[in-house]
Image: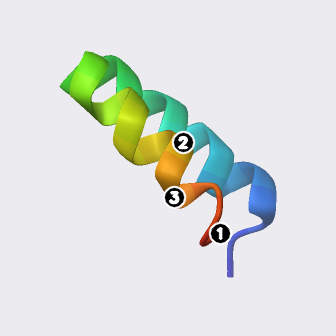
Amino acid sequence: MYGGNSHFIIRIIYIRMAGPKAKTLASNSLYYA
């Protein structure tokens, strides 16, 4: 239903909300996306 851009935006929002720890999780999730 959503495009790849939506997942990218959600990831950015998650990083901003969760902080530095989320950055590591987000970069790890790039391999699975």
Badge 2 amino acid: Ser
Judge by depth and name the residue closer to the eye, 11 or 1: 11
**What is the CA distance from the residue labelled 3 to the residue labelled 1?**
6 Å
Per the image, the residue denoted by label 1 is 33
Q: Is residue 13 visible?
A: yes
Per the image, the residue denoted by label 2 is 27
For the residues carrying marks 1 and 2, which lies nearer the camera in this image?
Answer: 2
Q: Position of residue 10 (x, y in %)?
A: 50, 45
Q: Are marks 1 and 2 in contact (CB under 8 Å)?
A: no
Occupied quadrant, residue 23 = top left
Per the image, the residue denoted by label 3 is 29
**Marker disc for residue 11:** none
Q: Are marks 3 and 2 in contact (CB under 8 Å)?
A: yes
The secondary structure type at the circle numbered 2 is: helix
Say which quadrant the C terminus sits in: bottom right
Q: Are marks 3 and 1 in contact (CB under 8 Å)?
A: yes
The secondary structure type at the circle numbered 1 is: loop
* Residue at image location 54% in from the left, 42% down from the top: 27
Q: Is residue 14 visible?
A: no
Q: Earlier in the sequence, mark 1 or mark 2?
A: 2
Badge 3 amino acid: Ser
Badge 1 amino acid: Ala
Occupied quadrant, residue 13 = top left
Q: Classify 10 Å Cα crowding around label 1: few (below 14), some (14-19), many (20 and above).
A: few
**What is the CA distance from the residue labelled 3 to the residue labelled 2?**
5 Å
**What is the CA distance from the residue labelled 1 to the residue labelled 2?**
10 Å
Q: Position of residue 11 (x, y in %)?
A: 50, 42
* Residue at image location 49% in from the left, 52% down from the top: 28
Please state if 9 lies on the left or on the right of 26 as rendered. Answer: right
Judge by depth and name the residue closer to the eye, 13 or 18: 18
Q: Classify 10 Å Cα crowding around label 2: few (below 14), some (14-19), many (20 and above).
A: few
